[in-house]
Image (cartoon, grey):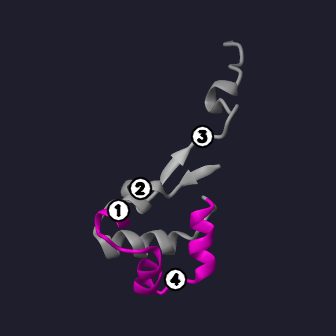
Amino acid sequence: MGFSYKPLWRLLIDKEMSKSNYREALGLSSATLAKMGKGEYVSMEVLDKTCNYFNVPLDQIVEHVAEPGYEGISQIKESPQV
């Protein structure tokens, strides 16, 4: 998955703002909103506009979700010390 926009959706609920109103206020395309709805990547420009519009940090808009079965840095094998 990679990223989740659940924090943004919660923020919209708190602000009593629909996704359509959000899209229109920021001048986003419906395709961009659809990508966000599917948890797909959007440009940093979209995230920046959103943070500025709501005056919030990035972590209140998007969160990282680890890929299932991916262990990250623990997959790297340490080389023997010489």
Of callouts 4 and 1, which one flags the residue occurring earlier in the amino acid sequence?
A: 1
Mark 2 crowd level (few <14, some 14–19, many ≥20, 10 Å Cα): some
Res. 28 mark: 4
Determine whether the residue tagged by mark 3 lies in a helix, strand or loop. Answer: loop
Image: magenta residue range: 11-38
Q: Amino acid at mark 2?
A: Pro
Q: Nearer the viewer, residue 15 or 55?
A: 15
Q: Are marks 2 and 1 in contact (CB under 8 Å)?
A: yes
Structural distance between the alpha carbons of marks 4 and 1: 17 Å
Judge depth for marks 2 and 3 and give the one in front: 2
Structural distance between the alpha carbons of marks 1 and 3: 22 Å
Q: Amino acid at mark 1?
A: Leu
Structural distance between the alpha carbons of marks 2 and 3: 16 Å
User: What residue is drawn where x is 66% and y is 40%?
Assistant: 67
Mark 1 crowd level (few <14, some 14–19, many ≥20, 10 Å Cα): some
Image coordinates for residue 76, horizontal then vertical, percent: 69, 26
Of callouts 3 and 4, which one flags the residue occurring earlier in the amino acid sequence?
A: 4
Is 68 above or below relative to 74? below
Judge depth for marks 4 and 1 and give the one in front: 1
Mark 4 crowd level (few <14, some 14–19, many ≥20, 10 Å Cα): some
**In the figure, is residue 50 to the left or right of 55?**
right
